[in-house]
Image (spheres, rainbow, N blue to C red):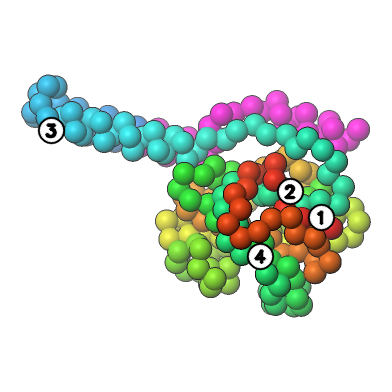
Amino acid sequence: MVIMVRRLNRLKKKIRLHSEGNSTLLWGGIVLALLCAVFGYAFGLESPAFLVVFIASVVVYMVVVNFFRCPIRLFDGDTEGIVIAPCDGKVVVVEDVDENEYFHDRRRQVSIFMSLFNVHANWVPVDGVVKKVEHQNGRFQAAWLPKASTDNERSTIVIETPEGEEILVRQVAGAMARRIVTYSAEGEECFIDEHLGFIKFGSRVDLYLPLTSKVQVEVGDKTTGNQTIIATL
């Protein structure tokens, strides 16, 4: 019952565009409108120069609007013992690796790359309690590179499931992503269907799972945040 009430409270905040984009959309719209006004005044509203600038401004603004869209999604199924995709994107890594920043042992890594055209809201992948939240400064190299997980700026969130399994979620900045937003706080309960955070522009999210996990996706698969089952525990 508590879980259902928490989820219903979250759904009351129905937004089609993510609040993280408010300032970007406002100031971006003002700048583009001023640019069009300058060209319209200088060359006339029917001039080729104005039309090119106007069309380009509309296209750019729509791309940014598309980037900040925030669909309302509910996972339709039992959440016990499963890991849900934390974001939209493409699976670029499925392998066993040494995770040396928190676990210091072997883990099953699943990484999802988000392009400029994906939804960049991040969802909580499992029900549980947040055990650790840490932000680490780093580089801004391309997010699909293997070294991005350990060299790029990133935020690490560790969640302990009701069954006692620990899942590590890592939000990784990319070449264009300059801001990682994490909503989770240590000690909080968290649930599938809730937002974990947001990453502005191209980036990736890594999951580090127990080796006993049964991964349900392969490299190259497309994921839908809060919908695609990544693994069973």
Q: Quadrant of residue 205?
A: bottom right
Q: Which mark is residue 94?
A: 4
Mark nearer the N terminus (2 vs 3) = 3
Q: Which amino acid does the dot numbered 4 rest on? A: Val
Q: Which amino acid does the dot numbered 1 rest on? A: Thr
The location of residue 16, given as percent across then percent down, is: 56, 29
Mark nearer the N terminus (4 vs 2) = 4
Q: Is residue 27 above or below residue 180?
A: above
Q: Verify CB contact (< 8 Å) between mark 2 and mark 1.
A: yes
What residue is shown with label 1?
A: 232
Q: Secondary structure under badge 3?
A: helix
What residue is shown with label 3?
A: 49
Mark nearer the N terminus (3 vs 4) = 3
C-alpha span from label 1 to label 3? 56 Å
Quadrant that contains the N terminus: top right
* Magenta: main secondary structure: helix
What residue is shown with label 2?
A: 229
Mark nearer the N terminus (1 vs 3) = 3
Mark nearer the N terminus (1 vs 4) = 4
Q: Residue at x 50, y 62 (%)?
A: 143
C-alpha span from label 4 to label 2? 14 Å
The location of residue 230, given as percent across then percent down, is: 72, 53
